[in-house]
Image (cartoon, helix red, strand yellow):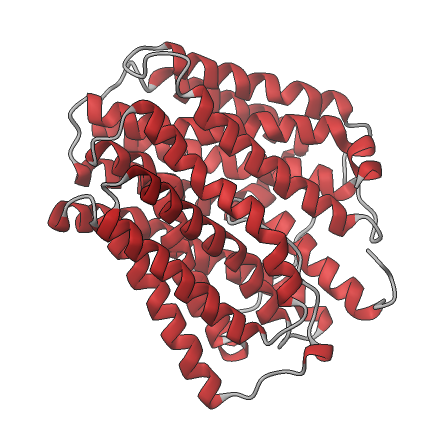
Amino acid sequence: MLVVIQNAWALLLGILLLMVGNGLQGTLLGVRGEIEGFSTLEMSVVMSAYFVGFLGGSRLAPEMIRRVGHVRVFAALGSFISAVLILYPTLTDPVSWTIGRVIIGFCFSGVYVTAESWLNNAATNETRGQTLSAYMIVQMAGIVTAQGLLLVADPSGYTLFVIISVLVSVSFAPILLSISPTPAFDTTKPLSLRALYGISPLGCVGMFMLGGVFSAQFGMAAVYGSEAGLSLGQISMFVSAFYIGALLVQYPLGWLSDRMDRRMLILIVAVVCGFGAALGAVMGAVFPVLLLAAFTVGGMSNPLYSLLLAYTNDYLEVEDMAAASGGMIFINGVGAISGPLITGWAMGYFGPMGYFLYIGLLMFSLAAYAAYRATVRPSIQIEDTTSYAPVLPTASLVTVEAAQEVAAYEEEEPENPS
């Protein structure tokens, strides 16, 4: 790991600043929307728009890079991000924010594709797994750090939006100045969704449901906090709890994933996550319990992304693993688009507890489907499964394909410690 950090510290620093900026803008908009008097429905549309743009960027960014190159795409999309961030406090109406969120989502998706392709190019087969781990830790650290910055200025003013814009702009410097050769860029043609579902129904259904859960965390947590009457400091702690849980639980679950029936582990993780959501719905008014609920939901749901990828890999040939990445990301993205919309409806109908009710419903449904699949398909022997590689739902196609490459490499070279 130290070798990876030494060789790619500038890239990782730039990505850290990007994640701070992106993590702060989502939380800040949730708080500012309450100040501006936006309804829960309006905020759910605004938050959903990010995932519309992100999904579009994941499809179009690779072609843009092939046409004009990494540096131009990176610079152009970064400029749009900074511009939209400055415009948010100027154009304070739901329509403008929705358009801005589509643009921001598209641009961040493209920026991630570009930065992650450079990071992946800097890794070797032997270090790619450690590089993915370092990247995941940097992502989580960036999002958690962002929540602390929420407290440095009044969210009703301009200062926080300027800070985000500056962070995103500054993040380009270490990334661009550390790059020597521009990496060749290509992505594998994805498997059709029909073929992917036929290979792993549980993987596909789980990815769709998990998209809704993740987008509720990333897009609607601050909206929930505002609706529940939390203070600014409490909202910061609440949002952070999701990602601290994810960071601390990711590796223990990964260790278990390589040593037990993954389908059973998916079922257990989904049930624990569902009970965490139920705890938040019933006792969310008690703030320490609310933090425990967020920690549990984040700690279970975020590693579930990597677990579902690993489970799906178990039923794929090595040469098809990378091809499955695009389909899995697309399914997750569609679920993510619907997440804030349904969460907003649930909160409008049930009050703030609707936030956790929606997450709990998805996770208990996933557990039930995993139990059903156990009755129609035998488990794979543990010694025949592929390796677990840590990936977060915020990652682009490049990183997910890299995780598949790690699994394929370790399938072919099981004696290699990486």
What percent of the width, then of the height, locates residue 319? 72, 69
State the residue lying farthest toward the right.
Answer: 415
What percent of the width, then of the height, locates residue 92? 24, 20
> In the image, is residue 71 above or below residue 414?
above
Question: Would you say 179 lies left or right of 270 here?
Answer: right
Asked where in the image residue 272 lies, by quadrant, the reply is bottom left
Which residue is pictured at 59% across the width and 59% down the height?
A: 253
Q: Nearer the viewer, residue 90 or 145?
A: 145
What percent of the width, then of the height, locates residue 69? 67, 34
Q: Nearer the viewer, residue 129 or 279?
A: 279
What percent of the width, then of the height, locates residue 12? 69, 31
> In the image, is residue 132 above or below residue 387?
above
Which residue is pictured at 49% across the width and 51% down the height?
A: 299
Residue 395 in view of the camera: no
Q: Quadrant of the N terminus?
A: top right
Which residue is pictured at 34% across the width and 39% down the height?
A: 288
How many marks the image carries: the answer is: 0
> In the image, is residue 375 above or below residue 405?
below
Q: Quadrant of the C terminus?
A: bottom right
Asked where in the image residue 271 lies, by quadrant, the reply is bottom left
Residue 306 in view of the camera: yes
